[in-house]
Image (tube, rainbow, N blue to C red):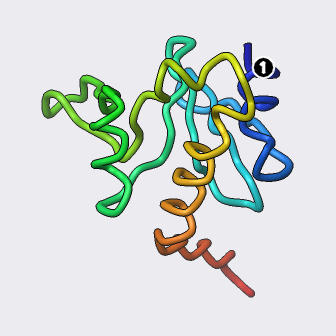
Amino acid sequence: MIDWYRELLETIGPVSARKMFGGWGLFHDGRMFALVADEVLYLKVDAQTREAFAAAGSAPFVYESARGRAEMGYWRAPDEAMDDPEAMRPWARLAWQAAERQPQSRKRRVRGS
């Protein structure tokens, strides 16, 4: 499954996968732009791309936390794009663009350096 999701998204370039939080994070050029939870592919969204995903009938990734329901900036990949890398290309590009616009967190400095 992860290999297929990587293949779907690699129209934008090499994609790596890393296990995290019981699912997978998918990365391109060091930035996470997609996640897989419960075998469902979610793509990064922001204020500029959210409407396109909503118009395609997608829904946000929501999880239960100690504080209640929480929504992340990832939305389900559109169903019509799940069978063909070329159909996924515009969605992968939107997710990558949203990831690029998000400021990267600064890595913690190691004490003593």
The structure residue drawn at horizontal position 67% and vertical position 16%, both measured from the top left corner, is 83
Give percent across and percent down for residue 81: 58, 26
Side of 78 relative to 31 (left or right): left
Q: Residue at x 65, y 32 (%)?
A: 87
Q: What residue lies at 49% left-to-right and 72% top-to-bottom?
A: 101
Q: Where does residue 63 sit, x and y in percent of width and height?
A: 30, 25
Q: In the picture, which quadrant includes the C terminus?
A: bottom right
Secondary structure at badge 1 equals helix
Q: Is residue 80 above or below residue 101?
A: above
Other-residue count near label 1 (Cα within 10 Å), few / some / many at <14 / 14–19 / ≥20: few
* Picture quadrant where residue 1 is located: top right
In the rendered image, residue 75, in percent from the top left (x then y), is placed at 39, 35
The answer to which quarter of the image holds residue 67 is top left
108 horizontally vs 61: left or right: right
Q: Which residue is mark 1?
A: 4
Given the current orientation, which residue lies at the most extreme right position?
Answer: 14
